[in-house]
Image (cartoon, helix red, strand yellow):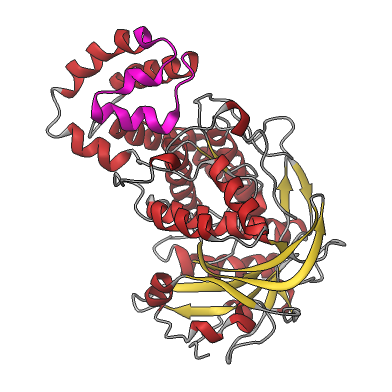
């Protein structure tokens, strides 16, 4: 396997990671390979022979496997040391467009940060992350990507019992997290914090003029990302600071889910008992997460008091960034190219009626372009009350139908279909997985013959909880 690695993170001081190889497995077998992403990365691979690499049994030339260390607030409680407990970063490549990208194995065995875990992943979460991350990419959301999935030929043990082991090969702009900065700040290791800041700014925000400018840029990227999630009904499920990537990409698809029926306090994650990361709370949590980053950046500044004052102002300005991004994206969903504050009651009025009428989030917005949105409501009269004002408003727009079609997906990865896919795969049937990948690669296109994937779940199919898989 020829991969032209350039492993810049591994050239940082040893305290940033532990050098450790992935653990070999019994019977590696390639399950999926993303040829389109491989081409984007400039990789020319005989992927049919790559199972041992993607399962972690063989290292490609030039790889320098490391497990990265970081800290993080998990559901509000601070853990001073976390780290890659079941992943190793093989190395980095620079793609033909000049972008540096990490290649990481997830589920590749224990590391010093496994906290008594086995370091493995089972097939279900691997397939979930593969499908959902690629669907998010097709939806236009900044995200980590799935390059490959491999079976290990070994059972692992979870609450489901003995389940098939698997490894995901993940690609990211980097795996640097808010928690990476927190790790060194908590240890008052200012020298390492400076090194991390210099590295991260050069890699992701080269135009930033100092830590304050860097913080503004990260806040802007995160505001756009979370507003994009919410415009699609996506719920991350575990927005801990160690799952907030400085690159502005969606990372760590554990108990994630897309809403069916719209409700602002929807929660799926089995580990989010208090609803901290509920759909509507995501807009607030990301501001809180950025406040933790700001706190970690204070030691970099020569005047602590002045830094706190400036950083506080940046964080206090962030909710307006989230609101503006939300308004722009939600406005586009109802055909408004440049929605203003005056349009907010129109958008909120529709959402309130959707909540009361138990309307499907994705299908309702898509149906606006087809004249059938009222059919999504238990009481269509509620929509009828809203529609005249909306139609009067979009008469001032040039081409609202095209904008709505480009903003409202025809199909999403529905929770019950993901669960069906996982159940089938456990029995050795990967056709549902391949079908979902194919259909979700074109989420804005109406595709004949796959209308079943658009259908909301029947009462017996509703997925009440999603799980992280660790």
Q: Residue at x 38, y 37 (%)?
A: 325
Which residue sits at x=59%, y=76%? 9
Is residue 327 placed above or below 78 in the rendered structure? above
Q: Position of residue 338 (x, y in %)?
A: 24, 33
Horizontal side, residue 228 vs residue 60: left or right: left
Position in image of residue 293 (x %, y %): 61, 50
Q: Magenta span: helix, strand or loop, mainly?
A: helix
**Foreground residue among 387 and 376:** 376
Rendered residue at 13%/22% (across/down):
395
The magenta stretch is 357-382
Residue 80 lies within the magenta run: no
Residue 211 in sight here: no
Residue sticking out furthest to the right: 116
Q: Nearer the viewer, residue 133 or 378?
A: 378
Q: In the figure, residue 426 lies in which quadrant?
A: bottom right
Q: Residue at x 59, y 63 (%)?
A: 176
Q: Is residue 145 left or right of residue 167?
A: left
Whether residue 149 is visible here, answered yes or no, is yes
Q: Nearer the viewer, residue 335 or 9?
A: 335
Note whether 375 is above or below 295 in the view shown. above
Q: Is residue 365 magenta?
A: yes
């Amino acid at each position: 396997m020829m991969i032209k690695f350039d492993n810049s993170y591994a050239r940082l001081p040893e305290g940033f990671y532990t050098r450790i190889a992935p653990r070999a497995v019994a019977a590696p077998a390639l399950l999926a390979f993303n040829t389109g992403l491989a081409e984007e990365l400039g990789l020319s691979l005989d992927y049919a022979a790559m199972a041992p690499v993607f399962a972690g049994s063989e290292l490609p030339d030039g790889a320098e496997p490391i497990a990265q260390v970081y800290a993080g607030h998990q559901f509000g409680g601070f853990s001073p040391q976390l780290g890659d407990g079941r992943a190793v970063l093989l190395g980095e490549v620079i793609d033909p467009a000049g972008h540096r990208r990490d290649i990481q194995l997830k589920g590749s065995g224990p590391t010093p940060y496994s906290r008594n875990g086995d370091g493995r992943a089972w097939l279900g979460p691997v397939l979930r992350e593969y499908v959902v991350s690629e669907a998010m990419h097709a939806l236009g959301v900044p995200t980590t990507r799935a390059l490959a999935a491999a079976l290990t030929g070994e059972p692992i043990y979870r609450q489901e019992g003995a389940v098939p082991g698997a490894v995901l090969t993940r690609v990211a702009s980097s795996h640097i997290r808010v928690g990476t900065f927190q790790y060194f700040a908590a240890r008052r290791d200012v020298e390492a914090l400076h090194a991390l800041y210099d590295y991260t700014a050069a890699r992701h925000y080269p135009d930033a003029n100092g830590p304050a400018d860097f913080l503004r840029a990260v806040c802007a990227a995160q505001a756009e990302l979370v507003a994009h999630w919410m415009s699609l009904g996506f719920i991350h499920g575990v927005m801990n600071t160690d799952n907030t990537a400085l690159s502005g990409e969606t990372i760590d698809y554990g108990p994630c889910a897309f809403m069916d029926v719209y409700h602002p306090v929807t929660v799926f994650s089995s580990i989010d008992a208090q609803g901290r990361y509920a759909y509507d709370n995501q807009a607030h949590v990301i501001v809180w997460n950025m406040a933790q980053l700001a706190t970690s950046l204070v030691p970099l500044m020569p005047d602590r008091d002045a830094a706190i004052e400036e950083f506080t102002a940046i964080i206090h300005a962030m909710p307006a960034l989230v609101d503006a991004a939300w308004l722009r994206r939600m406005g586009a969903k109802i055909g408004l190219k440049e929605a203003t504050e005056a349009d907010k009651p129109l958008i909120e009025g529709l959402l309130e009626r959707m909540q009361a009428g138990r309307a499907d989030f994705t299908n309702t917005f898509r149906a606006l372009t087809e004249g059938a949105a009222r059919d999504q409501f238990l009481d269509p009269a509620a929509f009828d009350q809203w529609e005249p004002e909306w139609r009067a408003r979009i008469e001032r727009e040039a081409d609202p139908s095209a904008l709505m079609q480009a903003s409202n997906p025809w199909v999403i990865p529905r929770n019950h279909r993901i669960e069906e896919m996982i159940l089938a795969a456990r029995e050795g049937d990967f056709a549902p997985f391949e079908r979902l990948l194919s259909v979700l690669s074109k989420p804005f296109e109406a595709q004949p013959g796959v209308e079943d994937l658009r259908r909301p779940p029947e009462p017996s199919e509703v997925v009440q909880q999603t799980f992280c898989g660790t």
